[in-house]
Image: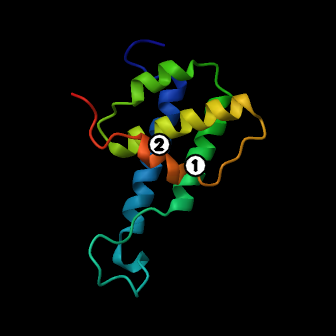
Amino acid sequence: MSKDEPSQADALIQDFLEGLIATDEEEKKPENIDPYFRHLEDVGGIHFWQLQQSIEELASALVNLDEDLDEIESRWKDHELFWGRYLATGAIEYARRWKEDEDFEDCEFSMDWFGNVEEDPKE
């Protein structure tokens, strides 16, 4: 792998990130918002269960890679997009907990993880 090529983990995270962003944009379309809420501002977007599913699926893939989770995290914790910081670091932490306890399952993890991600990374 050259410096210009992403690691397997980085490529995987990028794929999940692009899918998450596309899903968020799709969920914001007026026809995909419950008619009851369409008159409100800033409605629509990705649902909690979709975030949770993305984190769990990405974590499952990261657990099986032979890459250092700390190194991966150092590359993603200051990503320019909130979704990049959120998804990558959330999945990495989920993978760590999964490695420690193979029965780890936290259906509220995604919701709790929002508080751990900086709104704007340090410059």
Q: Could you tell me which residue is drawn at 66 percent across and 38 percent down? A: 60
Q: Which amino acid does label 2 sit on?
A: Leu
Q: In which quarter of the image is the C terminus?
A: top left
Q: Where is residue 15 in the image (x, y as percent from the top left)?
A: 48, 41
Q: Where is residue 105 in the image (x, y as percent from the top left)?
A: 70, 46
Looking at the image, the residue that sits furthest to the right is 103
Q: How far apart are marks 2 and 1 (CA)?
A: 12 Å
What numbered label is drawn on residue 2?
none
Looking at the image, the residue that sits furthest to the left is 123
Q: Is residue 101 left or right of residue 23?
A: right
Asked which quadrant contains residue 61, the reply is: top right
What numbered label is drawn on residue 109?
1
Q: Could you tell me which residue is drawn at 58 percent across and 49 percent down? A: 109
**Which residue occupies the foreground of this view, 67 or 89?**
89
Asked which quadrant contains residue 101, the reply is: top right
Q: How crowded is mark 2: few (under 14 residues within 10 Å), some or many (20 or more)?
A: many
Q: Which amino acid does label 1 sit on?
A: Phe
What numbered label is drawn on residue 87?
2
Tell which circle, 2 or 1, labels the residue nearer the N-terminal end: 2
Q: Is residue 42 left or right of residue 33?
A: left
Mark 1 residue element? helix
Q: Could you tell me which residue is drawn at 43 percent across and 12 percent down? A: 2
Look at the picture and state if 20 lies above or below 74: below
Looking at the image, the residue that sits furthest to the bottom is 36
Whether pointer 2 and pointer 1 mark residues with C-beta atoms closer than 8 Å, the reply is: no
Asked which quadrant contains residue 78, the reply is: top left
Looking at the image, the residue that sits furthest to the top is 2
Q: How crowded is mark 1: few (under 14 residues within 10 Å), some or many (20 or more)?
A: some
Q: Is residue 77 left or right of residue 50?
A: left
Q: How many labels does the image show?
A: 2
